[in-house]
Amino acid sequence: MEAASSSSSSRCSYEEYKETVDWLLSHTEQRPKVAIICGSGLGGLADLLEDKMLFPYKDIPRFPTSTVEGHASRLVFGKLQGRECVCMQGRFHFYEGYSMDVVTYPVRVFSLLGVETLIVTNAAGGLNSSYNVGDIMLIKDHINMPGFAGQNPLCGPNDERFGVRFPCMSDAYDRDLRALAKQTAAEQGCDSFLQEGVYCMLSGPTYETIAECKLLQKLGADAVGMSTVPEVVIARHCGLRVLGLSLITNKVVTDYESNEKANHEEVLRTTKQRTQDLQKLVSHFITKI
Ligand SMILES: *[C@@H]1O[C@H](CO)[C@@H](O)[C@H](O)[C@H]1NC(C)=O
């Protein structure tokens, strides 16, 4: 599937998703109930799986392919702590030029595969002044900024086979799963750097200006990033339960006198350090659902 700038020209039909799903079902015997989307630099989670089956995106019929640095590009089926799951190593970002349909394509595939729970991870900038670099934030809620600008992945005709026309989003991030994640974090000694807050999505690829950061803080956002929200919207539409985790890889700049600058290398470096903890958290969490 090619990157496309117009969402209407690239809407995917139910039959297209089915084609992908049927191909996957015929190529693996695994029937995972949990899917994990690995964010920037967090693909190592998929390497922990046992009895792995790897499917490069380019080999999967109808599946899009990803381009950003720090991302492998494949679906990994396998067992994490004995629990079957499927990981997306490398996600599709809106800023790469993909339509929202393409960005969220894998989520509907997961749903049709029989997945019931989606775990999404990302690297995000910390807006909340009490957050430290390396903190893990449980996503409690989101602000869909591209949605404000008409880029909601559910714009366009609604296919009832996936979900209702006007889906509820007030319960997007499952309360029970968050409680379970907090419990897991306490057991794993991760609670000293666990936060819970609101994730705001911007389209990117530019990082935020100082004025934009101040605005987002006023709006009640605790972290900001360029992903996750479209996938969560589509997941909720088709009835998946969602757990979202942001790794705070940098603190945003809110001071005009500061010489600090946001950069992608810093994000990848910090991610590397706290990745182990995040992996530990997710792999123990998964045994509890
Ligand atoms: C920041 O995070 C802290 C700790 O989680 C929270 O109590 C606070 O409400 C958040 N927001 C602001 C604006 O400080």
Image (tube, rainbow, N blue to C red):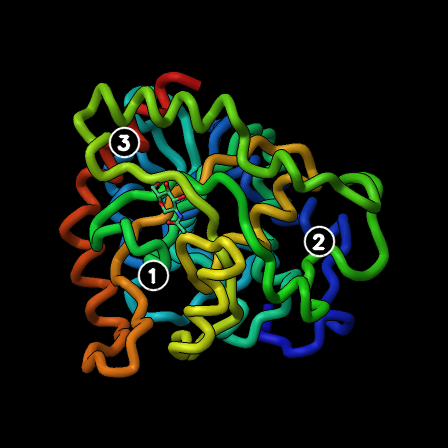
- Residues tagged 2 and 1 counted as in contact (Cβ below 8 A): no
Residue 142: image x %, image y %?
Answer: 54, 49
Q: Residue at x 28, y 74 (%)?
A: 262
Q: Earlier in the sequence, mark 3 or mark 2?
A: 2
Question: Which residue type does callout 3 highlight?
Answer: Leu
Measuring from the top left, give residue 128's x and y in whole percent. Answer: 35, 54
Q: Is residue 115 above or below residue 74?
A: above
Q: Is residue 62 above or below residue 8?
A: above
Which amino acid lies under the numbered mark 2 shown in the image of this protein? Glu
Q: Nearer the viewer, residue 266 or 127?
A: 127
Q: Secondary structure at mark 1?
A: strand
User: Which residue does the numbered mark 3 point to in the structure image?
Assistant: 281
- In the picture, which quadrant includes the C terminus? top left
- Mark 3: give few (<14), some (14-19) or many (20+) Cα within 10 Å: many
Marks 3/2: CA–CA distance: 35 Å
Mark 2 is surrounded, within 10 Å at the Cα level, by few (under 14), some (14 to 19) or many (20 or more) other residues, namely: some
95 and 48: which one is in front?
A: 95
Q: Position of residue 237 (x, y in %)?
A: 70, 41
The residue tagged 2 is 16
Sequence-earlier tag: 2 or 1: 2
Question: What residue does disc 1 label?
Answer: 125
Compute the Cα span from label 2 to label 1. 35 Å
